[in-house]
Image (cartoon, rainbow, N blue to C red):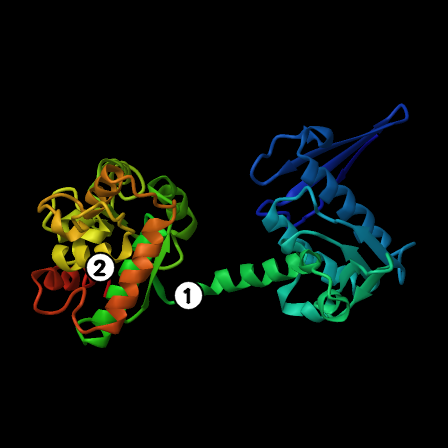
Amino acid sequence: MLYLVAIFAAFLVAVFAAFYYTANNFFRIWVSDSIRPEKIELEARSTGLQWFFSFYLVFLVESEQHHRNAILLLDEPGVTLHPLAQKNLFAFFENLAKKNQMLYTTHSPFMVDSDHLERVRSVYIDRTGKTVVSSDLRASERLYGINQSQSIYPAHAALGLTVSDTLLINCEPILVEGESDQLYLSALKSLLISSGKITPLKEIVFVPTGGVKGIKATVGILSGRNDGRPYVIVDGDTPGQKMKTELKGDFYAAEEGKIIDISEFTSIPKGEIEDVFPARKFAALVSKFLPRPEEVEDEFEDVLQDGIPVCDQIEAYVNKHNIQLDKGWKVRLATTIKQEVLRGRGKVIDENNVEFAKVVSLFQRFV
């Protein structure tokens, strides 16, 4: 005997139909959906779909019958689902909760409803070894002095996800390669706004991509939030130029103007973000930043050469004199430079420098 039962479920973006067949004491299920209309046995579909299907079928039907007014206890529901499908479970749970009290445990931030944190309980072990359930999400730290912040990590992460969803609303996101680029450009943005050189209609937000290799992935995430693709700033070095070519042939084929080669705003052919500043002023601050062994007579600013990216020269200088720098030295240097820019007084850049006009023209692209 063949039975056809249609189940319309908001599982990600597809509508699913289930086909049941019983014969000779066998019960088999095929599933098709709006994306893949061919019928496939349920066992051949993903673990997440199998879980969702059985959960949906049992609880939707039984909540009206045998499970009506029951207390539903779920352990890690949706653990095999895609994160977005986990978020979609909230609507289904809300519907079930109209007829049943529901309790579930989770370690996933996608299963914590940040709009209803009053429903969340922290579960932890106290000093006597007993399990405690508390509506005070910081109870384990405040009452017992035990560092168990991991017990509320999903709630923290859920808040972070909510914040990240709203951070770029009415903003102009601009992708940069690293944290140091973000620091330099943020400082210059503040300088230009305070001096009245630019008046952005949207908040300009510089988003580091974790290196040039992370640009494409970040473009994919941020595209469509505002108007088309986000702006991308690449360095004039070989990796930056390679990425520029790839983006023009792929994501930015119709929006090449949103790819910005920073070397065009410097006086150096392969310039980087650091090279938008007046070289001598920048080098003077680098001299104060770098540790200098007693036997080294020349400061960095004394050996600075024109036409060569300043970061390349810094690396050559420290290698020559066996000066040890940690991996985060570029970010620490950028933090120092940013502080000087924000203090003003022209120590790094001001309107009397030719570089200032180039920086203004760079930022005018975004406003």
| In the foreground, 257 or 286 | 286
Residue 104 point in image, percent of width and height: 78, 56
Q: Is residue 121 above or below residue 41?
A: below
Q: On the picture, is 215 further left or further right than 32?
A: left
On the picture, is 125 further left or further right than 32? right
Residue holding disc 2 = 285
Compared to residue 200, the image places residue 104 above or below, namely above
Q: State which quarter of the image contains the C terminus.
A: bottom left
Residue at image x 66%, y 42%?
16
Q: Earlier in the sequence, mark 1 or mark 2?
A: 1
Residue positioned most to the front: 295
**Three-letter code for the amino acid on which mark 2 is drawn:** Leu
Quadrant of res 317: top left
Of residues 314 and 103, the one drawn nearer to the viewer in this rendering: 314
Q: Amino acid at mark 1?
A: Ile
Toward which corner of the image does residue 312 lie, by quadrant? top left
Secondary structure under tag 2 reads helix
Q: Secondary structure at mark 1?
A: loop
Q: Which residue is mark 1?
A: 169
- Distance between the Cα atoms at labels 1 and 2? 36 Å
Position in image of residue 33 (x %, y %): 62, 39
- Looking at the rendered structure, the number of numbered marks drawn on it comes to 2
